[in-house]
Image (cartoon, rainbow, N blue to C red):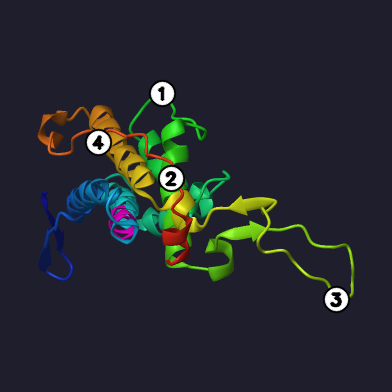
């Protein structure tokens, strides 16, 4: 990580910025907890979820820090506030989150061949940001497993048969989006973003061999409703 030196002739003072490698650390930790989640997925649902949440959050932190790190290098100081708030020339004109819009702007500053807003990688990065939002801004009703049962068409008193088969079951947030498989997918999207950036700036990717591919496996489908309902 380079040291940034700035000097102000008027104030007659200089400042050295010795950067810490948070972007790298976040991806390290995303990979670390993906490995833990893979080991736990057949053993303990609770431990798998704990590791998966940790990995996914670090994937989101990687994306955020990646954008901010390279914004400092490629966007002028007096324009950085507009970039950060997606204002003026950086106004978000997409359906993607502001975070992914800023990533789109950063990537397109480095290539003559414009990266489109519907690029698959950007869509997958947007998924990471959205699941992070759901976890950080937890809403119990939205996150719950929902079991739909047929109810009488009546405004008066009625009974429900809880022993009968439901009309539909909607999995919980944890079952749908916070599992080992998704943690792997999100880590792999971050890894792909890193390799894409290296390609755009002409940097050798050999130094990033520390971030290996993690294969997405086919998880066994079992009736684990009792375990999952206890969460």
| In magenta stretch: residue 95 | no
Report whether residue 53 is seen: yes
Look at the picture and state if 167 lies above or below 209. below
Q: Residues within 10 Å of mark 4 (few under 14, many from 20)?
A: some
Whether label 1 touches label 4, CB < 8 Å: no
**How far apart are the alpha carbons under marks 1 and 4?**
29 Å
Residue 110 relative to residue 213: left or right: right
Residue hosting label 1:
113
* Between marks 4 and 2 in the image, the one whose residue lies nearer the viewer: 2
Q: Which residues are magenta?
A: 48-55
Counting residues from the start of the chain, the first of labels 2 and 1 encountered is 1
Q: Residues within 10 Å of mark 3 (few under 14, many from 20)?
A: few
Which image quarter is the C terminus in?
bottom left
Residue hosting label 2:
222
Report whether residue 85 is seen: no
Please, which residue is most extreme toward the front here? 163
The residue at the point 25 percent across, 36 percent down is: 214
Residue hosting label 4:
214
Q: Residues within 10 Å of mark 2 (few under 14, many from 20)?
A: few
Residue hosting label 3:
157
Residue 198 relative to residue 227: left or right: left
Q: Residues within 10 Å of mark 1 (few under 14, many from 20)?
A: few
Residue 12 relative to residue 164: left or right: left
| Picture coordinates of residue 93, whole percent (x, y) | 58, 45
Question: Mark number for residue 129?
Answer: none
The residue at the point 21 percent across, 27 percent down is: 202
**How far apart are the alpha carbons under marks 2 and 3?**
37 Å
**How far apart are the alpha carbons under marks 4 and 2?**
23 Å
């Amino acid at each position: 990580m380079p040291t940034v030196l700035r000097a102000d002739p008027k104030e007659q003072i200089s400042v050295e910025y010795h950067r810490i490698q948070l972007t790298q650390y976040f991806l390290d930790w995303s990979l670390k907890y993906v490995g833990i989640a893979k080991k736990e997925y057949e053993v303990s649902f609770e431990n798998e979820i704990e590791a998966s949440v940790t990995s996914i959050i670090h994937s989101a932190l990687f994306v955020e820090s990646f954008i901010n790190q390279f914004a400092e290098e490629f966007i002028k100081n007096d324009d950085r506030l507009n970039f950060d708030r997606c204002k003026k020339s950086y106004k978000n004109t997409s359906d993607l989150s502001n975070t992914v819009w800023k990533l789109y702007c950063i990537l397109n500053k480095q290539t003559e061949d414009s990266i489109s807003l519907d690029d698959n990688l950007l869509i997958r990065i947007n998924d990471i940001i959205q699941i992070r939002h759901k976890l950080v801004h937890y809403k119990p009703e939205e996150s719950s497993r929902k079991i739909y049962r047929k109810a009488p068409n009546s405004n008066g008193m009625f009974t429900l048969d809880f022993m009968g088969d439901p009309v539909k079951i909607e999995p919980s947030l944890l079952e749908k989006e916070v599992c080992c498989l998704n943690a792997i997918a999100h880590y792999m999207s971050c890894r792909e973003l890193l390799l894409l950036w290296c390609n755009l700036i002409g940097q050798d990717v050999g130094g990033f061999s520390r971030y290996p591919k993690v294969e997405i496996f086919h998880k066994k489908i079992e009736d684990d409703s009792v375990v999952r309902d206890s969460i």
